[in-house]
Amino acid sequence: MNHLVIMAGGIGSRFWPMSRPENPKQFIDVLGVGRTLLQLTIDRFGEEFSPENIWVVTSNKYASKVAEQLPSVPKDNILLEPCMRNTAPCIAYVTWKIKRVDPDATLVISPADHFVVNINEFRRVIRQGISFVKGSSNVLTLGMFPTRPDTGYGYIQAGDEISGSDICYVKAFKEKPQLPVAKQYLSDGGYYWNAGLFIWDAATAEAAMRLFEPEIAMLFDNMSAHFGTDKEEKTVDELFPQCRSISIDYAIMERMSGKNISLRGMNAGVYVLPSDFGWSDLGTWGSLYMQLDRDSMGNAIVGEENVRLIESNDCIVRASGDLKMVIQGLDGYIVADDNGTLLICKKNEEQRIKQFSESFNK
């Protein structure tokens, strides 16, 4: 069976003050459309996955938020991490859980905070990806066509295409580049944004974890002995924090790419499917700005009924609750309020927002 895994444990620090550790961005109606990012993630997959095959991995402090926003997802499919350990332990947890009930499962892994414009194309790509990996030891990642030399994304360098397919071998994963390098990637071609969306069989995920991260695999072997019992929560709380904090890219993807690897007695490789369905990770105010409608002066507003912009250009404004804003004379600014906190920041300085938020905790 096909299973959807949604990773929903991040804190969205670059979206402060709207996103905070107690209520991060995936649980917020960021776009002002009446649905949170988590709910939109479920929506875009449509009926491709039945509710009993949808899994959400999140922090234990967000359990009630997930259950409230996704009432169709079984409670037992909401997996709670006692602490943050990045994406490799997160994916190991859900892999060991799913393999208990469906050893032949194929997993589609998705973050909870992305945005997609062309839903039909997105679903077509997902179906193509599932068909490609099923029954193999291959990993397929979706590469987004870059529209600008963005320094906020990692990149995937594609190799040769598979004959008769638009799927390519992955030559290498590249870290977030400096601007001149990002410009070179776009000039050279064959580089795609790494969206953190990938597809593989659960048996492949387990085998790769055993090969590259045996200590993490051993911890989940110990935990899984208590899965489905009244000791599961206590065991996970005790052993999960012993996992080292590492991303799935570092733990497995980069180690598999461009190499001859054998998993489950089969040749295994990492492949990329170049995709164009209007994607954004909505990781910053700037990326949100690009997805919103803008007026004739280039301003984007969430909560428009409470905002008046006068002689202002190229701004993004978010008004929460009943607060009314009148803004005059700003050019290229972020203005956002939430729960008594107001941020006014130059758009081109948004990388400092995390630093600004941390100044209140000193």
Image (tube, rainbow, N blue to C red):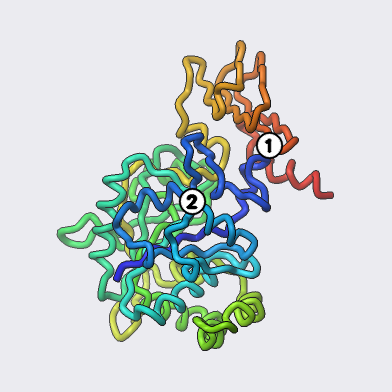
Q: State the image coordinates of residue 334 (x, y, percent, origin top left).
A: 63, 29
Q: Residue at x 45, y 82 (%)?
A: 211
- Can residue 343 be seen in this snapshot? yes
Depicted 4 relative to depicted 315: above or below: below
- Can residue 250 be seen in this snapshot? no
Locate the N terminus and report the quarter of the image it occupies. bottom left
Residue 202 placement: quadrant: bottom left
Q: Residue at x 81, y 49 (%)?
A: 361
Depicted 215 relative to depicted 91: above or below: below
Q: Is residue 281 left or right of residue 123?
A: right
Q: Residue at x 57, y 81 (%)?
A: 232
What secondary structure is marked by label 2?
helix
| Residue under numbered circle 2 | 38
Q: Which three-letter amino acid code belongs to the residue tagged 1? A: Asp
Q: State the image coordinates of residue 172 (x, y, percent, origin top left).
A: 41, 61
Q: Which three-letter amino acid code belongs to the residue tagged 2? A: Leu
Label 1 environment density (alpha carbons within 10 Å; few <14, some 14–19, many ≥20): some
Q: State the image coordinates of residue 196 (x, y, percent, origin top left).
A: 45, 57
Q: CA distance from mark 1 to mark 2?
A: 20 Å
The circle on residue 321 is none
Q: Nearer the viewer, residue 276 or 81?
A: 81
Label 2 environment density (alpha carbons within 10 Å; few <14, some 14–19, many ≥20): many
Q: Are marks 1 and 2 in contact (CB under 8 Å)?
A: no
Q: Earlier in the sequence, mark 1 or mark 2?
A: 2
| Residue under numbered circle 1 | 338
Q: Nearer the viewer, residue 235 or 285?
A: 235
What secondary structure is marked by label 1?
strand
